[in-house]
Image (tube, rainbow, N blue to C red):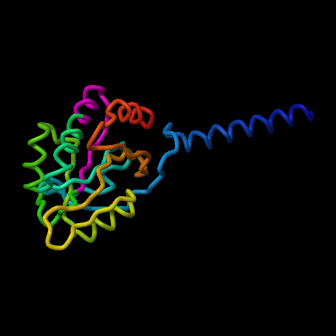
Amino acid sequence: MTNVGENVKKLLVVVALIFVLAACGSGIDNPLNYEVSDFSYVDQNGEDFSLKDLEGKVWIADMIFTECDTVCPPMTAHMAKLQGMVKEEGLDVEFVSFSVDPEVDTPEKLKEYAEGYSDDLSNWHLLTGYSLDEITEFGKDSFKALVAKPEGQDQVIHVIKFYLVDQNGTVLKEYNGVEDTPYEEIIEDIKKVL
């Protein structure tokens, strides 16, 4: 009887470990584990779009603005390329670009900007409809990212990363969105999370 009792205890320990590992198991080594703050903004179609719309979905996020004359054009081109690669792979992924210049970036302006890079915006949401202070705080809280618009300037200082976010709104990993964007690594990481 003692052997049976010991075996049952061992089995319960193994089962418990499996559940713990499954719960932590994004498959991403050393995940960032930042929690995205709740939000409700407006997309390029003028429609409300919130964190609730992303529940249960894997998504890639970045921060851009339409008047950017340095890092945003390559970032947006890389995001469009990644979007195309994800589509070719048949992966169900959403893309979210937060404007860091919301007073300038209207939904119409964001739509026109995005259409210069992609002919399919069905899973790409470019967001605005908040103040500069709100996006500065949101970037810091959700992505540990800097957003700053110096007084009297038309350019915004902002992070140049792409972020992989899981189905629960947890930021798992960041990637360079400007140079040497690791497309294949991002796709492999997406597959680990899906």
Image quadrant in which you'd find residue 103: bottom left
Q: Nearer the viewer, residue 40 or 152?
A: 152
Give the residue displayed 14% in from the left and 72% down from the top.
152
Residue found farthest to the right:
1
Residue 185 picture location, percent across and down: 38, 32
When the figure is inspected, residue 98 is found, relative to residue 173, above or below; the finding is below
Q: Residue at x 11, y 60 (%)?
A: 106
Q: Is residue 45 visible?
A: no
Residue 141 at x, y = what percent? 39, 63
In which quarter of the view is residue 83 placed?
top left
Q: Which residues are magenta?
A: 82-98
Image quadrant of residue 75? Answer: top left
Given the current orientation, which residue lies at the most extreme bottom position?
151
Q: How far from the left and from the top, in percent, is residue 17? A: 67, 40
Total marks placed: 0
> Does residue 94 show up magenta in the picture?
yes
